[in-house]
Image (spheres, helix red, strand yellow):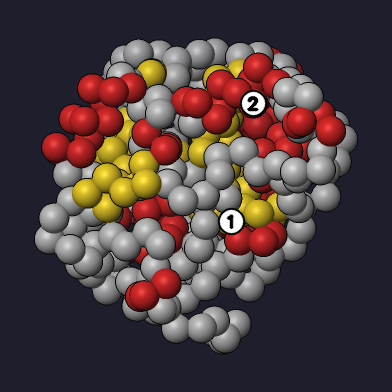
Amino acid sequence: MSFCMTPTPDRLQDRYPSRISDRPALLPRLDPVLYRSSESGQVASGQGSAGPLIAAQQKRYEREGFLLLPDFFSAEEIAACTQELDRLCQSEEVKRRQEAIVEPAGDDLRSLFAVHRISPFFKAVAADERLVQIAEQLLESPVYIHQSRINLKPGFTGKEFYWHSDFETWHVEDGMPHMRAVSFSLLLTPNFEYNGPLMLVPGSHTRFAACVGQTPENHYQVSLRRQEYGVPAPELLTQLVAEGGIETCTGAAGTLVVFDCNTMHGSASNISPLPRSNLFLVYNSLENRLQAPYCGLPPRPEYIATREQCEVVVPQTVEYSSP
Ligand code: 6CS
Ligand code: FE
């Protein structure tokens, strides 16, 4: 497999150094949260930038690093999504794919990556104008899918996703230069306080939590099942939570969580009988394509971090009829 020739990482140009020092640190965020074209009159008048999010929502996203949007997808649309998810999960071919990640204990499916490439249905979801136009508004540019996945977190056996900043991994292991990417988590099943919902730390996106420890080779073969490198030191997490608290994103299926690439988040194990399945779509600005990984190791595979197939997502009106 050839990689597009990306420059070797310039450690001196590494604006977010992590997994280098043996001392954890909270560094300043050097990138905007909301990208805005300065000539936009609406911004000057305080109305915010043009797009689906009103000014108050933009302000909240800028302050907290995420938005919780209930009833974003209808019950019929979610029914179509879960029918496609069931089809994928029952496919022996899909379960044998490299994109299928099993839980650390046993063989329950934990995550299915690159669902926008494996499933034409989820490719259409990823192009849904209701999602893409929010991403374009926040990032102020055309966007492409950096990563897609469904985290299934099955009942009884779904294990935690320990605290982390996605950007820390995407910068160190994928070479993402700037904090100019946004994640959308669409709840495909109800997320209760007891079945491992996403937890976010409000305001944590404004600092970069530099981690300790050197990235192991082929780290993704372990980290996607249980992440131990690129996780914040307890003292950093304690400080971030003391300042911002923890918001648990519970809600009905169809709820949408929009969160900045650097917002600290995690989710607990699911010991309830009820699955917690969420679709994650990560939109990256076309101006923020991956460079050489800052850790100096070979790039992660394309199904985890889009490096070559950076097709601009064209917003579509999507009809969700159950297949
Ligand atoms: O390494 C990654 O890209 C994945 N790991 C986590 C814990 N969140 C983002 C993504 O799924
Ligand atoms: Fe994550």
Using the rendered view, name the quadrant where residue 139 is placed.
top right
69, 316: nearer the viewer: 69
Q: Eyeballing the image, is 80 above or below 315?
A: above
Label 2, residues with CA under 10 Å away: few <14, some 14-19, many ≥20: many
Q: Earlier in the sequence, mark 2 or mark 1?
A: 2
Image point (40%, 62%), residue name: 15
State whether label 2 is within 8 Å of ligand 2.
no
Image point (37%, 33%), residue name: 204
Label 1, residues with CA under 10 Å away: few <14, some 14-19, many ≥20: many
Q: Eyeballing the image, is 205 above or below 247?
A: below
Residue 309 position, x and y percent, is 67, 68
Residue 225 can be seen in this image: no
Which three-letter amino acid code belongs to the residue tagged 1?
Answer: His
Residue 129 position, x and y percent, is 80, 36
State the residue position of label 1: 146
Q: Quadrant of the C terminus?
A: top right
Which three-letter amino acid code belongs to the residue tagged 2?
Answer: Gln
Q: Quadrant of the N terminus?
A: bottom right
Image point (36%, 27%), residue name: 201
Using the rendered view, name the quadrant where residue 236 is placed.
top left
88, 2: nearer the viewer: 2
243, 218: nearer the viewer: 243
Residue 240 can be seen in this image: yes
State the residue position of label 2: 58
Q: Disc 2 to disc 1, how far (Cα)? A: 22 Å
Disc 2 vs disc 1: which is toward the camera? Answer: 2
Secondary structure type for disc 1: strand
Using residue 229 as the reference point, say whether residue 28 is left or right of it: right
Q: How many marks?
A: 2
